[in-house]
Image: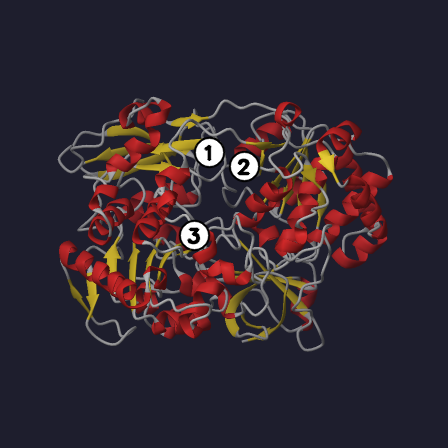
Amino acid sequence: MPAQKSKGFAMDNHEKWHKTHCSRMDHGGCALNVKTKGGKITGITGDPEGFLNQGYSCPKGRAAAEIHESPHRLKTPLIRTGPRGSNQWRKATWPEALDAVARGLDQARQEYGAKSAAFCQGMPKGLEHFALIRLANTFGSPNVVAVQDVCHAPRELTGRHMCGFYPVADVQRRSDLIVLWGSNTRATNEEGIINSQITARIRQGADLMVIDPRKTPLAGQADFHLQLRPGTDCALALGFLHVIIEEGLFDRHFVQNGCTGFDALAAHVKTFDPQWAASVTGVDKAQIISAARAYGRARPACTAWGNAVEQTPQAFDTIRCIVSLMAVCGNLDVPGGNIRAAEPRLLAPGKFVRADLLPDKRTQCLNAAYQTSPMLMTVPPAFFRQAVLYHTPYPVRAAYMQCTNPMLSYADSETTRKALLKLDFLAVADVVMTPTAALADVVLPAATAFEFDDIGHYGLGHGIVLARPKLVDPPGQCRPDLAVINDLGRRLTDPNLWFDDSKQMLESLIAPSGHDWESFVEKGFLTGEQEFRLYEKKGFSTRSGRVELAMDNAETLGAEALPQYRPPADSTDVDYPLLLTSAKSPNYLHSSYRWVKSLRRREPVPQIQIHPDTAQALSITDGSQVRIETRNGAIVQTASVTPEVSPEVVCAVHGWWFLEAGAHRRHSWQASNFNMLTSARTLGRQFGTPAMRAIACRIGAA
């Protein structure tokens, strides 16, 4: 089925099939066949020829037609007429709304300097993230606020510190062993990894190891399931390293020729024996030994790791241990291991975002005051709020937000609300009226998947970019984020730095590949020319030219030369005896889409998973209302009594709010919101990461 050109959607009453890729349901990647007629989406199926998914599609992706036509969609720009959060608005034209946004941001720049304006993004969903960085750079602000502190940056940047690249799991090629570490690929696309790829490798003979506090369906299929306590991943990895080094299972050739600091690491892990690891993690000692041996003997083994390893203040040391495992076992830069993914020939991200216009960004952004990793180029939410509330290290007075809902996604929602209310000006672009948008001065109606031309996976380090052609017109006056940013750029900065049409952004980005937009869409995706064992020719892109198992510059990052295990700061006690964690839903994307009927039917209420023994001891029954309380707050979710979690652990769902209650009302975002339970009191030095897991809690009947 050839791709159709993106024009004439509303008038065309002929049924057509189009090839595209899913987007805005996670990072996307599933190739889809989408049927349209009369400007509407009438059918969606997985494309059997899909590079990543081979025909698979999930309920979220198949709900795109319902999202497109939802009555909950914002369809016209809105300007606030009453007090913040009062839900009093008037409709505005796009020129009027854009002028208001430009005026609010420029006023902050004129009175307090360009860095007093923040540009905020949630999980990157397409090219809009990089367009927003370009807007910030051309505006003069170093402060792009994003959620990379708990998503992607700890893995990517720790990898770059240690081996010079982001070690991506190579699930396209044969492996002896696949390790899913804090990653549930049956529930979500883990940044370019679709579960069908895992299944294909298992059919080729790969063993499967799942490291997860929950007995997920994948854990039930695995050869090894290590059900560790939340927040103890670093201890488990240290135990693995002890066994592998003590028993001589490491790759001697790779260690000798590709690593530095091995002797120091070997001496360091002697004290972290399996008995110690078992006492910390709750995993049986014999199971730790057998799993470590399996990883040490596999040639190759690949580790697909998820956000779970990034969501505690100890993320840096945890990930250092996991990268050390990849290195000492020779699983870096080899087919079927963890690779430096070769990017296709595209305009480099630095050039696209015009980084040259803000050369002192590292020293001027909020991060500099907290001495985070110098590679971290987005601002952690905790630092953004400090700047708004307390003007530390300097004031932030205005913000523009897209593809994000901080009231649900930032740790400590009450503090987030205070910060948003204190801003002199806030503009939000979104698909529906969210609790965050309800606090804005200007709300802009955003287009969503299949309603505009877009490129997926650019700049994420996965070695692939995906074509997402426009298939239908957006409803009402909804506009793509790319077009909105382009128009704001022309108002706020030198118009010559922007484009006559936002689609020219796409053309400029793919031009180095030799493709124009139409030929790129026809091809569907681009990958780089993958090479392996580049270290044999060029070494690693680190200070030493080797994988740095011991880091001689670790002190500048607020760490020790070798990774240390530190128990979760929020330890359990008699008053808060349980450990709270969370997991991604297969039906929603963070706080998005609970207003979509088909998805809501699949998961109608927020549920907390509780072991039967724990539920019985507390007189909690399946389906009953449960009060969850931490030292930071309390919420209510519905009990799901299941042996999927251990008796000492409860797993609540995050991202829940109730559009039907009114986004501006406190009950909507407060009642079941996981981030009412979290805090940002303790942060990881390297990435500003708060504790989003391994939180001491107590539960009881509501």
Horizontal relation, residue 45 to residue 612: left or right = left
Task: Name the residue at 29% across, 65% down.
Answer: 108
Residue 398, quarter of picture: bottom left
Position of residue 314 relative to residue 1, above or below, is below
> In the displayed structure, does residue 428 sit left or right of residue 241?
left
Q: Amino acid at mark 3?
A: Lys
Indicate the position of residue 209 as horizontal and vertical percent values: 69, 40
Q: Amino acid at mark 2?
A: Asn
Q: Is residue 604 left or right of residue 373?
A: left
* Foreground of the two, 167 or 161: 161
Q: In front of the other: label 3 or label 1?
A: 3
- Which residue is located at x 21 percent, y 62 percent? 103
Q: In the rendered image, which residue does mark 1 sit on?
A: 56
Q: Secondary structure at mark 2?
A: helix
Looking at the image, can residue 67 be seen? yes
Kind of residue at disc 1: Tyr
